[in-house]
Amino acid sequence: MFRFNRYLTKMIVFTIGVSTLPIILLGLFFYLKTSGTIQKKVNDGNVLILEQTRQRIEQVLVAFDLQIERLADSPFVSEAMDKGLGPSQFLLVQSLLSSMSRVQTPDVGVKDIHLLDLKRGTILDSGGLNPLTDADSVIVKKYLGIDRSKFWIAENESKLRSRNGDHSLTINLVKKIPAFSENPDEMLIVEIPGKQLRSYLSKNNTLGQVIILDESYRVLATQNEDMQLEPQMMDMLISKLRGLNELSGLIETSLGQGQVGVAYQRSSFNGWVYISVIPIELIRFESRRTGGIILATCIVMLLLAVVISLAGSQRMYAPIWRLYQSLFSQQDKERKRVDEFHMINEGFMRMRNRQVQMADQIRNHTRQLEEYYVLKLVGGELKPSQIHEKLGMLDVNLSKWKQMAVLTVQIDTLKGTRYSERDSELLLFALSNMACDLIPAQDRLVPVVAKSSLVTILFDNPQVTDDFRTYLFSIATKIQNEVEHYLSLRISIGVSRSYGGLKDVSRAYKEAMDALKYRVLFGQRTILHIDDVQPAHVVTAEYPKELERLICDAVKMADRDKVPELVDAFFEDISGQYHNYNDYQIAVTRFFVNLIRLLQESGISHLELLGDDPPLLEQLHTLTSVEDVRNWFKTQLIEPMVRVYDEQRKTKYQTISQEVVQLIHDRYDTDITLESCSSLLNYHPSYISKVLRQELGISFSDYLLHFRLKKAMEMLENTDMKITEIAEKLRYNNSQNFIRSFRKLAGMTPGMYRDEYMNKSYRLRKL
């Protein structure tokens, strides 16, 4: 009737999927549920068999243990411990042998019972009373080293009285007498053949292999000797069991080439471990058989579901096929397979896309046109007669408001943020979008960017009960908070006065920009209204000339400690006095010019020292806070100046100090003074004294006194001049003053110094 087009194919696939998926899931659920139940029952049965085996064996061992306890507590054993055993104790020996033979019941299968007298070194068993051999002493020492009064232990052969020649596995029950004694007098050792344990294991268990291990994980008995695990597999199994801390459980592990399930139980009676090893394939055999039945049932149901789905899909598709033939049979004869609903949907989507594209284009053109007219308004390029005409074309209703004002937004700084200068335009675009979101469209014109600022024209909202100025500040605060929250930027906002017509937009824009200039005085992240920052009357402020003079003097003296304090005081003074932005800028510029003049008067080129890219004044006028301006002066201008003056000062001080020292060396035998040196060098005496103290660390008079003393010592050592002659040559008023000064500095009189020097010279010549 019709070919298999895409929609029909999808419908068939869907209906088959809807009908077959529940069948598959249901079959899978039943298989998992039944296989899990069967596997659990097999595991539970295996655990139950293992539990019954353990209880059956422990029941026999516990009963036998009680008989051994009664034998150990019998008066015959106590008498033997006191008197010892020997030929003279024939009756006691017969009584003990009789008691020991009664313990050897057939259900336990005891091989032999040994009573050891540790003090006297004898052993009593079925072979009679004999002394302990060396081999017996070794096993006794081993058992005494075990810190328990009673325990079960497995031996590969009968260690005691090994002359009996039995080398099969033996399980020994060892009882020390008396119990809990560090040095027991006697010891009971009961030997049970290992094959006796195997007789307690059920021969009818077809699920797996039952194995009994002792505390040290040695194999004591297996259910079927012909089906024993290989040593390597047994070692792997024991290593798994050693890592388990539970008393019982069920684990799955791999042994050799296959997976096995291992059920285990630890005995609290003697510490033995009972395990049952079952191949996983055996456990899952019943699950697979059940799964085969479920699979066959599901296949039949699936085939039935497919047939019903095909017939039902074609019947439901018939109306769609007839509709498609009536609409598209002529146009799409070339197509072999088509998606009918897709073709119909394509036609509607093309119409919708054209409509959306046209709406977007109109919206974009309208926004661009509105931005263009707003820029014209801000620049004052629209005549009053054109304003209503141009904005009326954009469906801007100008009759609802009575007042308008302008907000200008500027980013304070990008320093310390994750943005750089190249992100400025993108950030202003983001600010424009945020302003559009925060301010209702009926209360504003579209925000525009002009001169690195975001400009927004706001109208008063009749629904807002607050006055217009309060409303402006609330909008500005909201913008400021949102920008800081989402963009981590600090911005400042200038607010103009309110006006009654759009013809005053250009004036309002200038006022808002002028208000922003005052953030240099009020700091960053501020909202400034033009009425708040421009004073009503002009107050003449006094320029701090004295502070400027002190700063210049400190710079010339290279006083690094004093300069920062003076600069801080200067800026605190002008920021406190100058409330008008223009006056403040003039004061800062005047300070800048005077510092540059200071450099030029000192013969220093400010271009070589500070550079001029970008120009210094341009750098200064871009700063937006008093703190930034102050730091700029300190780091970019004053610090380089201090460094240059400090280098000049050091060079000059060194030259002056060298000239003064040379004058002292040349004229020490004249009436040279600080004043005479200052006169010769054309410097003030106090300045000369300051330079010497800073460069040499000593005053002029002290240096002259020490140099004359040095010359006096040379005269005393190398000439025969009298003390009075030397004092007169060194310009002392009398010899007593010279002697007093010499003794004060040298610690002895001139005569004593000459005698000591002559004696030293004599001794050196004699040597």
Image (spheres, rainbow, N blue to C red):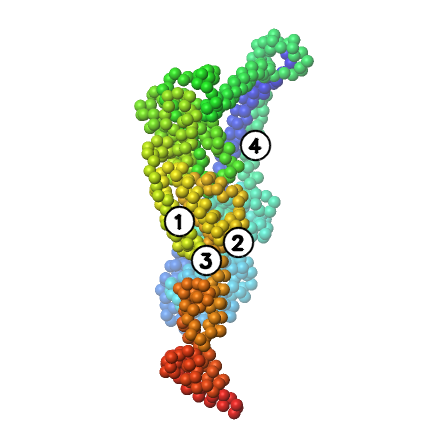
Q: Residue furthest right?
A: 334
Dot 3 or dot 4, earlier in sequence: 3
Q: x%, y% of residue 479?
A: 40, 31
Q: How many marks?
A: 4
Image: 104 above or below 352? below
Foreground mark, 1 or 4, reads 1
Dot 1 or dot 4, earlier in sequence: 4
Front residue of 750 and 161 = 750
Q: x%, y% of residue 701?
A: 40, 72
Q: What residue would you read off at disc 1?
A: 548
For mark 2, give the secondary structure: strand
Q: Which of the numbered marks, if any, corresponds to residue 734?
A: none
Foreground mark, 3 or 4, reads 4
Q: CA distance from mark 1 to mark 4?
A: 106 Å
Q: Residue furthest top?
A: 326
Q: Residue at x 52, y 50 (%)?
A: 605
Amino acid type at mark 3: Trp
Dot 2 or dot 4, earlier in sequence: 2
Q: What residue would you read off at disc 4?
A: 289
Q: What residue would you read off at disc 3?
A: 152
Image: 287 above or below 709? above
Q: What residue would you read off at disc 2?
A: 219
For mark 1, give the secondary structure: helix
Instruction: Please indicate, yes or no, whether residue 118 appears anywhere in the rendered image.
Output: yes
Q: Residue furthest bottom?
A: 766
Give the crowd class for mark 4: few <14, some 14-19, many >=20 residues within 10 Å: few
For mark 4, give the secondary structure: helix
Dot 1 or dot 2, earlier in sequence: 2
Front residue of 607 and 517 = 607
Q: CA distance from mark 3 to mark 1?
A: 106 Å
Q: State if disc 2 and disc 3 touch (CB < 8 Å).
A: no
Amino acid type at mark 4: Arg
